[in-house]
């Protein structure tokens, strides 16, 4: 197990560069950090082994592939932890269109993110869940999860930083070419997988794979690249903060404030959720409350109230930034 105090300047700079673009090549990383490729590779492997880096991901705009993304928050009643684990297992086994499911603490017990091409598909999935678990569900909230503005994370970085903005969830549909979907499935959760390795699995040329990935980037089906971070390993935790607003007149200022804040890494413009939703990474609850108070002081005339809840375990994580 690591800790953020264990990270030296090279670890922090490497994490910073990889969370801006986790597909950055070894030679480019070596040039940026002014160290050898062997040094960079050693540090990356060490961060992986300690659980600080948990993966290298592409951010896919599933709207451009014809999908609506629904977010469902669920609060259970009269359910033990073991029964909750059975619920997760049930979702894993029977509901392929659930892209992400995470345990939560506070206001909600679980968050599910579902991808459907037609609204009727959502009803079919939700009807299955309600048929099995209606008596245990105390309350739930359904929202259309789009658009999402994701930033590179900077909470671990102690030097001047540059936010990178990645938007997904509201793009027009783009027709896929042959093998694009197979490439996405192989590449999205391991963007450091070589074109040759993908080509060998799909029985095509590496040049074709590289061209198709470039085209997926050009059409913004792939909107960016990020790393998976083991927050617990670093002594941090993730929270969702919901702002209830008296007015939207300062929304642009709130957006810019969030974009520049090193502990805020995402803004969710969901339909059916809160007035203004943000995702934050903090050391602990006092740190979170301090961040909330800081926002209240910055925007006193528009923030009416604030709610928050935490994320713990991601049981499934596909396509959706955390």
Image: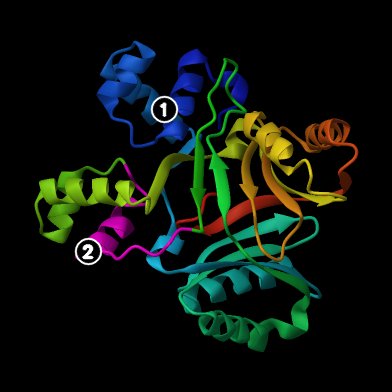
Find residue 32 and report its horizontal and vertical position in percent. Answer: 36, 16
Query: Is residue 186 within the magenta segment?
Result: yes
Q: Is residue 170 left or right of residue 127?
A: left
62, 256: nearer the viewer:
256
Quadrant holding the N terminus: top right
Few, some or many C-alpha atoms within 10 Å of disc 2 (few <14, some 14-19, many ≥20)?
few
Name the residue carrying label 2: 177
Q: Residue at x 51, y 47 (%)?
A: 167
Find residue 34 and report its horizontal and vertical position in percent. Answer: 34, 10
244, 114: nearer the viewer:
244
Q: Quadrant of residue 132?
A: bottom right
Find residue 85 and report its horizontal and vertical position in percent. Answer: 62, 68
Secondary structure under the numbered disc 1 in the rendered image: helix
Q: CA distance from mark 1 to mark 2?
A: 38 Å
Counting labels gives: 2
Find residue 300 and report its horizontal and vertical position in percent. Answer: 90, 37
Name the residue carrying label 1: 46
Q: Which residues are magenta?
A: 171-191
| Position above or below: 268 against 67 | above
Residue at the top extreme, as displayed: 34
Q: Residue at x 32, y 25 (%)?
A: 41
Evaluate whether residue 56 shows in this view.
Answer: no
Sequence order check, earlier mark of 1 and 2: 1
């Amino acid at each position: 197990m690591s800790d953020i105090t264990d990270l030296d300047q090279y670890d922090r700079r490497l994490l910073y560069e990889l969370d801006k673009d986790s597909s950055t090549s070894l030679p480019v990383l070596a040039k940026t950090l002014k160290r050898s490729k062997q040094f960079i590779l050693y540090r990356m492997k060490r961060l992986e082994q300690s659980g600080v880096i948990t993966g290298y991901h592409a951010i896919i705009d599933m709207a451009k592939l014809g999908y609506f993304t629904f977010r469902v928050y669920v609060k259970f009643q009269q359910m033990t932890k073991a029964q909750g684990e059975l619920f997760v297992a049930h979702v894993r086994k029977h509901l392929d269109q659930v892209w992400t499911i995470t345990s939560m603490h506070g206001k909600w017990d679980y968050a599910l993110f579902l991808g459907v091409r037609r609204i009727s598909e959502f009803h079919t999935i939700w009807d299955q869940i309600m048929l099995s678990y209606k008596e245990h569900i105390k309350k739930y909230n359904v929202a259309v999860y789009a658009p999402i503005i994701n930033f590179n994370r900077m909470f671990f970085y102690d030097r001047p930083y540059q936010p990178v903005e990645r938007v997904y969830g509201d793009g027009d549909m783009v027709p896929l070419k042959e093998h694009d979907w197979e490439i996405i499935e192989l590449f999205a959760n391991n963007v450091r997988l070589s074109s040759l390795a993908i080509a060998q699995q799909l029985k095509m040329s590496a040049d074709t794979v590289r061209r198709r990935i470039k085209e997926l980037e050009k059409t913004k089906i792939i909107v960016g690249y990020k790393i998976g971070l083991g927050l617990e390993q670093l002594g941090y935790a993730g929270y969702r903060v919901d702002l209830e607003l008296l007015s939207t007149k300062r929304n642009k200022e709130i957006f810019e404030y969030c974009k520049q804040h090193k502990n805020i890494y995402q803004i969710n413009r969901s339909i059916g959720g809160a007035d203004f939703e943000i995702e934050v990474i903090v050391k602990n609850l006092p740190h979170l409350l301090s961040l909330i108070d800081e926002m209240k002081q910055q925007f006193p005339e528009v923030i009416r109230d604030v709610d928050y809840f935490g994320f713990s375990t991601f049981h499934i994580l596909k396509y959706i930034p955390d």
